[in-house]
């Protein structure tokens, strides 16, 4: 199961009020020096191979290829000085590249 912290959920609700969206797509794409990059983006289309994860006003879509690698992940909202971002806290990661953009499983 993919979890989301209260802070991350509240931030997404606030952003949805400002710019409406249907879903947040979570997943993985190939790339980067470690092999995979996380996907975190708005989406309007549910695909047949998507799993829907419903957190009330926020609904996530995860494709069936990404789900086994990001299952047990927690979505965290980070505020670090002037930087604010959403982060995957995934216990299945084996390594992260030096720039922090891509991961390996």
Image (cartoon, grey):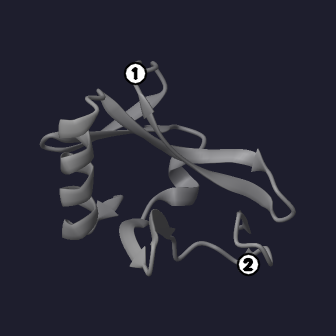
Residue 78 coordinates in the image, percent (x, y): 40, 73
Q: Is residue 100 above or below residue 14?
A: below
Residue 31 coordinates in the image, percent (x, y): 81, 50
Residue 46 shows which numbered tag? 1
Residue at (30%, 29%) from the top-left corner?
A: 21
For residue 39, side relative to residue 100 (left or right): left
Q: Quadrant of residue 38?
A: bottom right
Residue at (44%, 81%) from the top-left corner?
A: 81
Q: Is residue 11 above or below residue 105?
A: above
**Disc 2 secondary structure class:** strand
Sequence-earlier tag: 1 or 2? 1
Q: Residue furthest front?
A: 82
Residue 74 coordinates in the image, percent (x, y): 38, 68
For residue 93, side relative to residue 27 (left or right): right
For residue 48, side relative to residue 101 (left or right): left
Residue at (29%, 27%) from the top-left corner?
A: 22
**Disc 1 secondary structure class:** loop
Picture quarter with the C terminus: bottom right
Residue at (19%, 47%) from the top-left corner?
A: 13
Picture quarter with the N terminus: bottom left
Camera-side residue of 51 and 102? 102
- Are the residues flagged by discs 1 and 2 in contact, CB closer than 8 Å? no
Residue 95 shows which numbered tag? 2
Q: Quadrant of residue 59?
A: top left
Measured Cα–Cα span from mark 1 to mark 2: 31 Å
Residue 63 coordinates in the image, percent (x, y): 51, 36
Count the labels in the image.
2
């Amino acid at each position: 199961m993919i979890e989301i912290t209260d802070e991350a959920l509240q931030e997404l609700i606030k952003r949805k009020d400002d710019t409406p969206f249907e879903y947040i797509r979570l997943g993985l794409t190939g790339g980067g020096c470690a092999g995979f990059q996380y996907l975190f983006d708005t989406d309007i289309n549910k695909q047949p191979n998507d799993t829907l994860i419903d957190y009330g006003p926020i609904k996530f879509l995860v494709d069936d290829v990404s789900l086994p690698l990001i299952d047990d992940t927690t979505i965290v909202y980070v505020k670090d000085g002037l930087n604010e971002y959403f982060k995957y806290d995934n216990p299945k990661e084996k390594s992260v590249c030096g720039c922090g953009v891509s991961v390996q499983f």
